[in-house]
Amino acid sequence: MDYTGYMNEVARRREPLVIRELFGLQHGAPKDVVFLTAGAPNPETFPIVSGSLKLRDGTTLELTPDKMVDCLQYGPTPGYPPLIEQLKTITQTIHTPPRWKDREVIVTTGSQSGLLMALEMMLTPGQTVLVEQPCYTGVLSVVNPYNPKYLPVESDGEGLVPSSLRAALASCSPHNKPKFLYTVPTGSNPSGAVTSEDRRREVYQICRDNDLLILEDDPYFFLHYDGKTPPTSYLSLDEDGRVLRFDSVSKVVSAGLRVGWVTGPRQLVHKMNLHKGSSVISSASMSQVVVSELLRVWGLEGLARHTTQVRQYYQNKRDSMLQAADKYLSGVCEWTVPAGGMFLWLKVLGVRDTWDMVMRRGLEGKVMLVPGHAFMTDPIRPCPYLRASFSATSTPIMHQGMKNLAELIQREKELQRMKPQQG
């Protein structure tokens, strides 16, 4: 594929930084080569010389003096080399992408920084943008300043709806066609939907027919519930080289370490890496070394065991919230059982718009949720939806929250009934 047309003028003009190229050459160079290049601090001045981290199973990760230098020093822009190789192995093992030799992997500061770099590589003011709706608010926050023409694609309990994608594409101007489709296929934020295998294959073919890239944002990949095997990823289906896939350890290892990675066509990932080199220079070295050491100790089998435990933990959390919703919100709200992720997506019955109910009266009602407006391409339109998170809340608090929400909704309906009388 020729990727030039997917890039905006700024991305096309990005050129490698000589200093970063020289720094990259230093890793793996013969020991007798004298490098007088980088403005890196001398490790002899670092105040921390070693460390150890205790895991929940009692294992200790030892950060030796050599490892600690890696933790505290600048690193290559693409990422800590041992971690890059581990992430490549994980990606190949799980997804077996076609045309692997044409792909590249770089470390990102969580998924969000990768998404920002990809979007800023492609977006132009007024551009037509295809996103699933409801849509992850972190992407909307990047796209909105470009004043885009959104083409929202409907999603339901089985994820993105192919017929809605076709209809959206049929409605767009031939003079302002979209370049990509953005989607969260597993445990969508906020709906919790997992796009089915058949739909993924159909969506990929539609994107193929319309020459679209796919931004596959999959931070909840390991959080798919009810014992089901996750459907084939878009990366696994990608015979053409049209998928940029965004992964993260935030949901299954640590959100604070801020370690993610992007896998995609070498030409596109290279441009993203140039963006990274001129913005953050490199991702945090200590976070990368810690994740790398953790993966080294675990191996692929240990990673699989850990993600299975985390998945079961959050499935239990989901089930607790569903029990609370059944108890307090039956007949008050509608919802679909989330097949993955960390959220319950509620439609409030009899309340046309939830914004004031939550943002003005939620604190007084002793319950706060995210109004559905945050996930819509047109946040001004009335929206009856709410997002409830079950990931970090105990069962008793969930029940209290659902009880308080039911009471808040009841008071909102009473306020609505009073308004005509006040007029």
Image: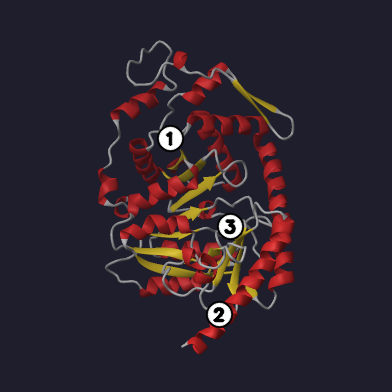
Q: Which residue is mark 2?
A: 415
In the picture, measured across the screen, residue 162 lies left or right of residue 388, that is: left
Q: Residues within 10 Å of mark 3 (few under 14, many from 20)?
A: many
Q: Earlier in the sequence, mark 2 or mark 3?
A: 3
Residue 329, above or below 423: above
What amino acid is at disc 3? Thr
- In percent of the image, x 38 and y 36: which residue is there? 280
Give percent across and percent down for residue 46.
47, 18
Which residue is at the far front?
Answer: 422
Q: Which residue is mark 3?
A: 186
Q: Earlier in the sequence, mark 1 or mark 3?
A: 1
Q: Which residue is mark 1?
A: 78
Total marks placed: 3
In the picture, measured across the screen, residue 182 lies left or right of residue 12, that is: right
Q: Residues within 10 Å of mark 2 (few under 14, many from 20)?
A: few
| Mark whose residue sits in front, 2 or 3 | 2
**Residue 143: quadrant of the picture:** bottom left
- In percent of the image, x 44 and y 45: which residue is there? 113
Q: Front-most of 7 and 365?
A: 365
Distance from Cα at disc 2 to Cα at disc 3: 38 Å
Give percent across and percent down for residue 219.
55, 50
